[in-house]
Image (cartoon, rainbow, N blue to C red):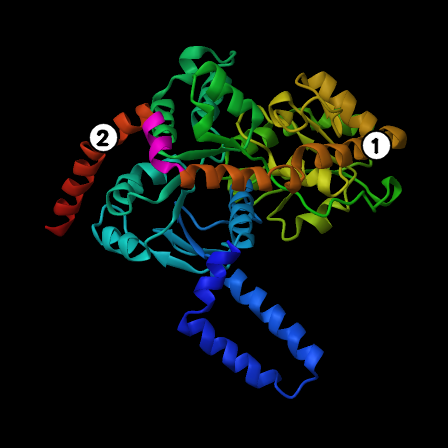
Amino acid sequence: MLKLAARLERKSFFACTKVLLLVKIFCKKDWERKAEIAAQNIQLRISIFVIVKHLVIIGLVIPEPASTAAGHRMMQLIQLFSEANHKITFLTASNNIEFSEKIEIEKIEINNESFNEKIKKLNPDIVLFDRYVTEEQFGWRVSENCPKALKIIDTEDLHFLREARRKAFVEKREVNNEDLVNDIFKREIASILRCDLSLIISEFEFQLLTEKFKINPNILFYIPFLTEKIEKNKTSFQKRQHFVSIGNFLHEPNWQTVLKLKSFWKSIRKQLPEAELHIYGAYAGEKVFQLHNEKEGFLVKGRADDVESLFNQYRVLLAPIPFGAGLKGKLLESMQFGLPNVTSSIGAEAMHQDLPWNGFIEDSDENFVERAVELYQNELVWDQANNNAYQILNEVFDKKLYANQFWKKISKIENHLENHRTENYLGKILQHHQLNSTKYMSRWIEEKNKK
């Protein structure tokens, strides 16, 4: 590498640069000049090998990290790529809304050939789809116009799993295999297979894909929420009061969670008559505010502007989540901000490995109420829950556990892209069929829109 640098250094650009540097430091002492020349030589050699790669993100929506766990996840991925010296372009057909993250975006149109020229001009090294529906819409265009670009999909959570659990919840029964293999399953698995790499946020979902559905682990990478600068709780038990629940109301499980809380809140209130339950969440409609009842201490507050300061006021988070998938952002934040919780097995899924939970995991209403009261009243139990949170954050979510492995995975695929794609033969088959179905459907819509 140094020999290559030395040869390149003799070329005119580096020769001119060196002359300028010599003029600049000519009047310095001899030993200072020699030291600075040596340092500049090293810097010039290093600069040869600094390559800025281009990441294009195609998003269904603009991230809302203050409102959704998906938005928080996307901003973490953006930070990860930024730290690795990637130029980032965010493409979306969505419009900015009041609570969207203030990032620079470029607008694109769905079913429009203008995307072809745009992506060709951008010439990305990597394309990241923010969920399977964006890959369905734009993946074939990326493959056709930028065949050497590495394609990654961030699954967020497995949408087919969430749908299977929703259906079983509505029908008041357990999830079965038929529920899992639904229409979303076929579309989502096809997207995963068409991409070079899929980011899986949940260890449970990674195992589901590899063990039950036999997806090649070489095209998957487990990377959960990432935490940095982990600190222990600073707001004591005695300085906190009341219960809290939080969740974006565009997400159906959050609405069902609040309905469940409403159904047994009186049982908690009966044992803790001074306690209140405060409900927070973005996009709370009229049906949510109709649950507000000051006399019962069931207070609907609406959007939370600052989760950290908010969580530092309360003593216990309640999250009896009845269905869903992926990881729960509210539960991660409860660990980060010293707020023990009581949740369901769905809520805690894949969030603590075999470590003790930072509170309690209960699925029956009766046990949930009992544990909520215990956690609210017992300071020793509450303190231990916070100690558990600190351990979980360090052993499950610490960024250092995943970042280096992530870049090793990316580098390995980039360096052997053709072999990687050849080994993913199902992906090649699906890519072929997509280019002969989705592609022509999209083009038919394009022509129809021109009329």
**Residue 323 image point, x, y percent:** 54, 24
**Residue 370 image point, x, y percent:** 78, 21
- Observer able to see residue 296: no
> Image check: 116 left or right of 418?
left
**Label 2: few (<14), some or many (≥20) within 10 Å?**
few
Predominant SS of the magenta segment: helix
* The residue stretch that appears in magenta: 416-423
Q: Quadrant of residue 348?
A: top right
Q: Nearer the viewer, residue 204 or 372?
A: 204
Q: Is residue 264 magenta?
A: no
Residue at the spot x=46%, y=72% of the render?
Answer: 14
> Image check: 129 left or right of 375?
left
Q: Which residue is mark 2?
A: 432
Instruction: Indicate the amino acid at tag 2.
Output: His
**Residue 95 image point, x, y percent:** 39, 55
> Image check: 48 left or right of 418?
right
Q: Which residue is mark 1?
A: 382
- Residue 168's place in the image compared with 152, above or below, is above
- Observer able to see residue 314: yes
Q: Quadrant of residue 337?
A: top right
